[in-house]
Image: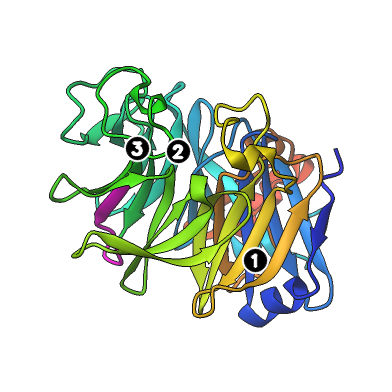
Amino acid sequence: MQFKANFSADIPHLLNELNISLILSTYQAGKVIVIGSDGQNPYQLVRDFDRPMGMAFQDDMMALACSMSVTVFKNDRQLAVTYPKKPNTYDAFFFPVQSNRTDFIDMHDLAYTSQGLVGVNTAYSCLSRIDGQYSFNPIWKPFFISDLVSNDKCHLNGLAVDSRGDISYVTAFSDTDVKDGWRTNKLQGGVLVDVPNNKIVLRNLPMPHSPRLYQGDLYVLLSASEKLVKVDVESGSYTTIAKIDGFIRGLSFVDNYAVIGVSKLRKTHTFADLSIAKKKLSAGVVIVDLTSGEIVGEIKYGSDVDEIYDVHVLPGIRRANIMNFIQSIQHRALITPFGSGWVDANKENQLSMELNNA
């Protein structure tokens, strides 16, 4: 697979002007993709992961939900600039430092919160802390879920955290309490739930995903109706910011822009009966002006990528690298409080001395 991407003419300049890179996860293709620009030409880096979905960032830490685990990475600038294969090329390097075994709980969104690293445990219809002590540690469930069993009762999927790190809202495809109950009215049964008060604030939503709080406003993607909306919690209503062709999922913000993941739905997909599945679409990313609702940049993939799950803006980073665990064994590194560096098996003593003197 070549993972060829087509970039609209505005993308290289826009990424450069905003001083950002983008990182996306596609569980269908089993890849994490990093996209950046030098102002003239875009670039992308593609890495293999096992069913990557939700991503979370806090300071120089990153977490990634995969099929059977949540991997934690540390962004180390020293590793970036000294990367042996391409020195002085990258300004960020996400190196895996921890793997938390979860088994298959169908983890969707992730977030660093005031309660630690928390994920949406879709199989068990709850929010779970990922702490390394348990496969998962349940910290909250919707009031309409009677017990924690692995049968995806409501398809809990999205998580919004406020600027203090407090968990604020979640999205689900329904408020059902039976196995796969969300499938019965999946096109119009979605709910937005206020977590602190454990109450539903919006109903009848068409497959809601990716609730996010940004600059005091709450945004949600209504995937089945292809809309980015802004929610007024007090009135229990929302206004449409933009209409985007495709199954939209994955939402991040920078300046006055929303960055949104776009998927095309395969005919064998669970959601193949949506009208979206009949459209000729490309998976990728769109950048939307929040004031006008206009699309100001697009990235489109060919047949290599059908679905995007999550999208994040990497602020202040122009060219990032990331390694999976297999790569990190082949390209070893040490990250310590007193320095970091790549390990040359023939010069390990020398590296130890260099770190001690850092």
Q: Residue under label 3, please give it.
A: 189
Asked if the residues shown at circle 2 and circle 1 are in contact, with their CB atoms under 8 angstroms apart, the answer is no
| Mark positioned earlier in the residue sequence (2 or 3) | 2
What crowding class fits label 2: few (fewer than 14 Cα within 10 Å), some (14-19), or many (20 or more)? many
Q: Quadrant of the C terminus?
A: bottom right
Q: Disc 2 marks which amino acid?
A: His
Of residue 13 and residue 78, the one placed in the foreground of this image is: 13
For marks 3 and 1, give the CA distance. 35 Å
Tell me, yes or no, whether the highlighted magenta stretch contains residue 163.
Answer: yes
2 vs 1, front mark: 2
Q: Where are the magenta residues, as a range? A: 162-170
Residue identified by numbered label 2? 108
- Identify the secondary structure beneath mark 3: loop
Name the residue carrying label 1: 21
> Residue, x 71% and y 38% (percent of image)?
327
| Nearer-the-camera pick, 88 or 280 | 280
Count of numbered marks: 3
Other residues around mark 3 within 10 Å, as few (<14) / some (14–19) / many (≥20):
many
Q: Note whether residue 319 is visible.
A: no
Q: Amino acid at mark 1?
A: Ser
Q: Is residue 316 above or below residue 110?
A: below
| Residue 6 left/right relative to 228 | right
The answer to whether marks 3 and 1 mark residues whose Cβ atoms lie closer than 8 Å is no
Label 1 environment density (alpha carbons within 10 Å; few <14, some 14–19, many ≥20): many
Question: Who comes first in sequence, dot 2 or dot 1?
Answer: 1
Residue drawn at x 45%, y 51% as measured from the top left: 222
Q: Report the amino acid beneath label 3.
A: Gly
Q: Is residue 98 magenta?
A: no
Residue 241 at what x, y percent from top left? 47, 68
Q: Percent position (x, y) of residue 310?
A: 54, 49
